[in-house]
Image (cartoon, helix red, strand yellow):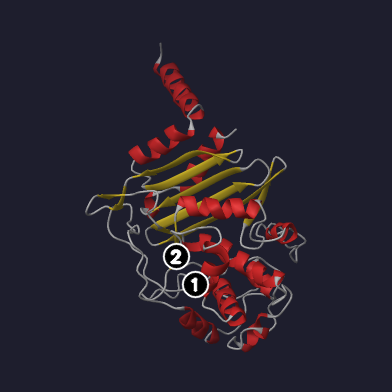
Amino acid sequence: MNRFYLFFCLTFFLLLGCQNENANQVINRYYEDGKFNGSVLISQNNQIIIDTVFGYRDLNNKVLLTKETPFYIASLSKTITATAICILAEKGLISFNDNAAKFLNDLPAYAKQITIKQLLNHTSGVKDYENILTKQGLTNKDVIHWLHSQDGLEFKPGTKFQYSNSGYIILALIIENVSKATYAEFLKEKIFNPLKMHQTTVYEANTIIPNKAIGYDRNKKIDDYSILTTGDGGIYSTAEDLYKFDKALRRNQLLSEQSTKLLYQTPVLEDHSNSKYGLGWFIEKSNGILIAQHTGGLAGFRSLLWRDLKNGNTIIVLTNQGDAFPVFNFLNDIKKTLN
């Protein structure tokens, strides 16, 4: 048997083995390869098939993770912010086509004409502060101050898609001004408490979150969350709590059926293409099936919420060893097990 044929056979059987992996085997492989430390919940046909944790919430002191360990979910928070805005719209307190400046006086002059919907679907042209403002303890007020120092929008509102964390900070401030409550208070009253998401918290100055996960990098050095912005991020949660949120959206518990559908509608851009982002969700169609998903990543944390809106399949992943985890490779491997 020549070496090339032997190599071909070994490669074929290795690939065949990977194709036949079940979800548990995929998760174990990533964990054993040092690529995953965290929490995974998977449902198929609206039934949980995996709900587990691997590794440590505190690597230095070898404190194990539990299902009740909250992780920082970073930009996955945008799905919750968008839902909160839709709640206000259903109450008639705002309209998606309202200018943001109607509810927030402290916007730069160049941003006075952007609408709430353009902020939600990232077509506002508002410049993104992330990777520019990096100081510890950064607040929403700091970001608004920075926007005032900029010379204008990136493009005419409504014409292009460009992801903007700054836009979701403006949305958080609108929530506060309209509801007369803090962002944290509004989410707790309208979303977290009704859904019994008891391990989910908006992180604010002096907030103490018992037994939360500490963030690390791939070399197991501490890389913990250290800023205070909300709307674009700012939330700690668990896989089980996020599954409650997923189910509530599927069952129209938080929003009417009509409002829920709006979450997944994408705008037509200037070049006549459809954007891939709705209201707080990346949207795609796969074999005619509508998929809504969002990821999050900051410091030592990565998060994923992937939802097949037809078949009741959900994949939720939270990790506190951020850059060790290849999010989309993992997602693709898990999706194969659901076919």
Task: Identify the residue at horizontal 43%, vertical 32% (top origin).
Answer: 25
Q: What residue sits right under mark 2 in the picture? A: 201
Circles 1 and 2: CB atoms closer than 8 Å: yes
In this rendering, would 33 be left or right of 47? left
Tell me which amino acid carries mark 1.
Ala
Report helix, strand or loop for mark 2.
strand
Image vertical order of residue 154 relative to residue 71, above or below = below
Q: Residue furthest top?
A: 1
Residue 128: x and y in percent read 54, 72
Q: CA distance from mark 1 to mark 2?
A: 8 Å
Tell me which amino acid carries mark 2.
Thr
Task: Identify the residue at horizontal 49%, vertical 67% (top origin).
Answer: 233
Report helix, strand or loop for mark 1.
helix
Residue 184 is marked as 1
In this rendering, would 134 be left or right of 42? left
Residue 47: x and y in percent read 56, 39
208 vs 219, nearest the viewer? 208
155 vs 325, nearest the viewer? 325
Quarter assignment of residue 302: bottom left
Quarter assignment of residue 9: top left
Image vertical order of residue 271 relative to residue 1, above or below = below
Residue 209: x and y in percent read 36, 65
Image vertical order of residue 306 relative to residue 32, above or below = below
